[in-house]
Image (cartoon, rainbow, N blue to C red):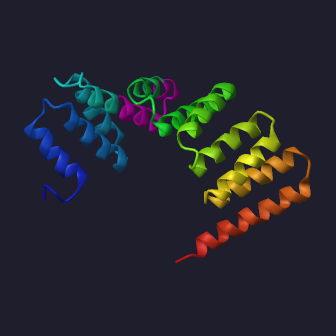
Amino acid sequence: DILKDEISLWSNNAEKTPHLAIVHNSLGAAFLTAGRLSNAFTELTKATESINREHAGVKYTTYRLLSYYYILGPDDEKALFYTKKALAGFPSDAELYNQMAAILMKKEKLGEAESEMKKAISLRKDKASFHINLGKIYLLRGHPDAAIKEAQRGILLDGNPLEAYWLMSEAFKGKKDYRMSDHFSSLASGFKLAKKQCP
């Protein structure tokens, strides 16, 4: 029974070693995955109060998990705060820069979002979704040609065609090239339909 899932496993560990932050982090992560946000917050709060919370890896993992919690919450200000704190411990984590860019986009701070997205790409040039996300930022900033280039890079890197086709459709619309916009919109619709019909 203890090993039946992540929640039961880490709940058992938390009962046996309630003073360890790493255990509360792991249980908090399991609750986040299960969508049990209030339980996740309880465990992550315990992690911040545990005796080994100052261990660098454990401490910054708590901050990362708290950033996920507040993204799901949602609370953009706190999500941004904890993402920055997590980056202080994991400065080479491309996903955290991507996360920072996504939060900044929601807050309509597009210049800052672009800067953070470029940091993510500098660390993971082969990540298709990063290029798609940068393309979305370019589109919102009124640079459709740059958005198209990033969408094309995303496709070449085997990214999500639906996202890339949607981005290209919107970018060509921004250029008032409605024929190409309709073309990529049709491709996106066709891909979405084919995906639904897959067994």
Q: Is residue 91 magenta?
A: no
Q: What residue sits 45% from the left and 36% below the top?
A: 93
Q: Residue furthest left?
A: 16
Q: Is residue 165 left or right of residue 118?
A: right
- Give the vertical position of 149 relative to 189 (above or below): above
Judge by depth and name the residue closer to the eye, 14 or 64.
Answer: 64
Q: Is residue 180 left or right of residue 157?
A: right
- Give the vertical position of 151 relative to 70 (above or below): below
Q: Position of residue 163 (x, y in %)?
A: 66, 54
- Determine which quarter of the picture holds residue 63: top left
Q: Is residue 146 left or right of residue 158?
A: right
Q: What residue sits 72% from the left and 65% below the top?
A: 189
Judge by depth and name the residue closer to the eye, 129 or 7.
Answer: 129
Q: Which residues are magenta?
A: 63-80
Q: Position of residue 194 (x, y in %)?
A: 64, 73
Q: Is residue 76 magenta?
A: yes
Chief SS of the magenta region: helix
Judge by depth and name the residue closer to the eye, 72 or 38.
Answer: 72
- Determine which quarter of the picture holds residue 20: top left
Q: What residue sits 54% from the left and 43% below the top?
A: 124
